[in-house]
Image: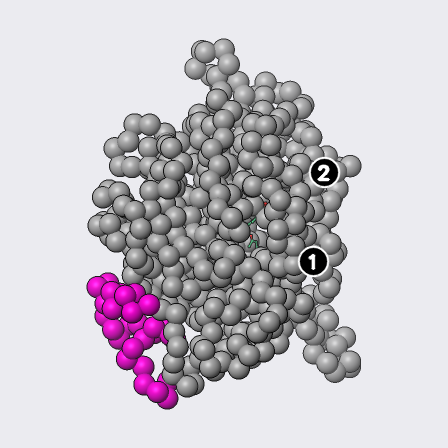
Amino acid sequence: MASLITTKAMMSHHHVLSSTRITSLCSDKSIDDKQIKTKPQISHRLFSRRISGVTRAVINLPASSPERESVEGERRCHVAWTSVQQEKWEGELTVQGKIPTWLNGTYLRNGPGLWNIGDHDFRHLFDGYSTLVKLQFDDGRIFSGHRLLESDAYKAAKKHKKLCYREFSEVPKPARNSFKNLFSGIGELVKLFSGESLTDNANTGVVRLGDGRVMCLTETQKGSILVDHETLETIGKFEYDDGLCDHMIQSAHPIVTETEMWTLIPDLVKPGYRVVRMEAGSNKREVVGRVKCRAGSWGPGWVHSFAVTENYVVIPEMPLRYSVKNLLRAEPTPLYKFEWCPEHGAFVHVMSKLTGQIVASVEVPAYVTFHFINAYEEDENGDGKATVIIADCCEHNADTRILDMLRLHTLRSSHGHDVLPDARIGRFKIPLDGSKYGKLETAVEAEKHGRAMDMCSINPLYLGKKYRYVYACGAKRPCNFPNALSKVDIVEKKVKNWHEHGIIPSEPFFVPRPGATLEDDGVVISIVSEENGGSYAILLDGSSFEEIARAKFPYGLPYGLHGCWIPKH
Ligand SMILES: CC(=O)/C=C/C=C(C)/C=C/C1=C(C)CCCC1(C)C
Ligand SMILES: CC(/C=C/C=O)=C\C=C\C=O
Ligand SMILES: [Fe+2]
């Protein structure tokens, strides 16, 4: 059987893994002929298909695969939007350059990596099944691997060869029998509001909790799943022990420190958000306070992420709002489960972490953001009392088109075309003096980072504090998706960009050097999908933003979303 896994990788992963644990379909030398014949077939039925109009990259397919023949001569789509071809792989990567000796630990990245079940192709980037990728840095070497997360949604899809749970844009097909339909329609409604039909496909983020547990997340509360960061095995659901789960949804990006976790739980019935805190080591979230939405009876604003300062929680109320009407629709609307209601205002609320009281609630210009970057308190009078909250986010110029640009068909068919809507670093200024209005300004001229801005990270030691550097995906135009890594100095308003032709890099993740005193003393890690179907991990110097090292994967990895760092103990 032809395999892309190089001999070197096959030999060297024995350094970290016992051979019995190597279960990759292509890399395991120990599997016998029978397994070789059956396993890839099972895998191909689930994983490998032609996509309408375009074809998946074929680089992972065995030379003899019938799939290879059927795709020869057709246009390939970028590997970033191509499903992984096997459930798991592990091996050592060959490093070019030199990994800093202090970089010991695991970078773990989550993201949707499988976008089809049987004959059914998913519609949206956010629908894909969670695929974890690890880069384990060990004394200058990198041991790597990927693995599909064993969520109930993925396991059911694999077993029944069809979609069984509601994903971001996909809804399982109702039963065919029309008599049954009436009852099943009511049943579906009940299942939606009980959360039963919602996905637990935790494909968005991954965090290391203060007690060392590693949790994958998405926007459904069921989609909080614990994993083993070394084997990438799924441990099981994170069981919240607090009775707050009837609220079904959550922010995909909790804010986690060594001692606690903060998150937001939107309330679809009485539009608002619960602000909750969970102590490290606990499974119990305590409600610190509640924010009532300003836009009256409309659904709460979509809250993918939020921000904190040292003393406050910054809660966005975007004009892009959850829509119960759209939630009930089987077919997606242009804005999926949301609706755009700028006429009802855009707001930002600020809550005291200590008392749960709202200390500011301001109207701001309309905005669209997935990701807050950071926030801090500014003391304009120099008397030690905060007068204004600064909150920065990746802002899409209040243009909701970005949500639909992330449809897989668009991503696959428009590579190289300049169709990516402009984005910027949006800076909210929220006065703490009771003013009605806050400001939203462009922090740094967007042209300097190619008018794309998303998937950000900062030095985690500056969380909630005055800071200077943002690492994010920017662009080298023309492009249909952020295709560069950018380091933005928001104080000096300077940008350093890193780009190679045809690439799609994932979130640049900053890891500080232990003992460093400068904010940008550290490295930036990203995983890059290449136009030729390959992929590599890249390490940039946090200060110069120049390449320090790279390590090629023996196969192409799709785009991924967010990552975390787990230091070696
Ligand atoms: C990948 C990513 O960034 C976002 C994923 C969001 C998901 C899976 C949202 C799912 C939802 C449902 C399945 C129904 C309820 C609404 C909503 C939270 C949007
Ligand atoms: C990948 C993305 C936006 C890119 C646009 O420029 C958003 C991802 C959101 C979820 O994590
Ligand atoms: Fe996100």
Instruction: Determine which residue is flagged by label 1.
Output: 327
Q: Residue at x 60, y 32 (%)?
A: 447
- From this view, report whether residue 467 is shown above or below residue 246: above
Residue drawn at 30 percent across, 53 percent down = 95
Distance, label 2 to label 1, CA atoms, is 19 Å
Please state which amino acid type lies under the numbered disc 1: Leu
> Which of the 4 quarters of the picture holds residue 213?
bottom left
Q: Is residue 195 above or below residue 184?
A: above
The disc, 2 or 1, on the residue closer to the chain's N-terminal end is 2
Task: Point out residue 237 in the picture as x, y percentages from the top left corner.
Answer: 43, 62
Q: Residue at x 33, y 37 (%)?
A: 522
Query: The residue tagged with tag 1: helix, strand or loop?
Result: helix
Q: Residues within 10 Å of mark 2 (few under 14, many from 20)?
A: many
Residue 214 visible in this rendered orientation of the protein: no
Looking at the rendered image, the disc whose residue lies closer to the viewer, 2 or 1, is 1
Q: Is mark 1 within 8 Å of ligand 1?
A: yes
Residue 390's spot in the image, x, y percent? Answer: 53, 26
The reply to whether the magenta stretch includes residue 15 is yes
User: Is disc 2 in contact with disc 1, using a CB cutoff of under 8 Å?
Assistant: no
SS at circle 2: loop
Residue 267 appears left or right of 156: right
Quick check: is 269 in the magenta stretch? no
Point 69% across, 58% down: residue = 327
Q: Mark 1: give few (<14), some (14-19) or many (20+) Cα within 10 Å.
A: some
In the image, is residue 486 above or below residue 359? below
Q: Which quadrant of the rendered structure holds the N terminus?
A: bottom left
Find disc 2 in the rendering and name its residue: 295
Q: Is residue 181 left or right of residue 509?
A: right
Q: Residue 483: tell me if it is visible.
A: yes
- The front one of 23 and 203 is 23
User: Where are the magenta residues, as a range?
Assistant: 6-35
Where is residue 199 drawn, in percent x and y? 56, 63
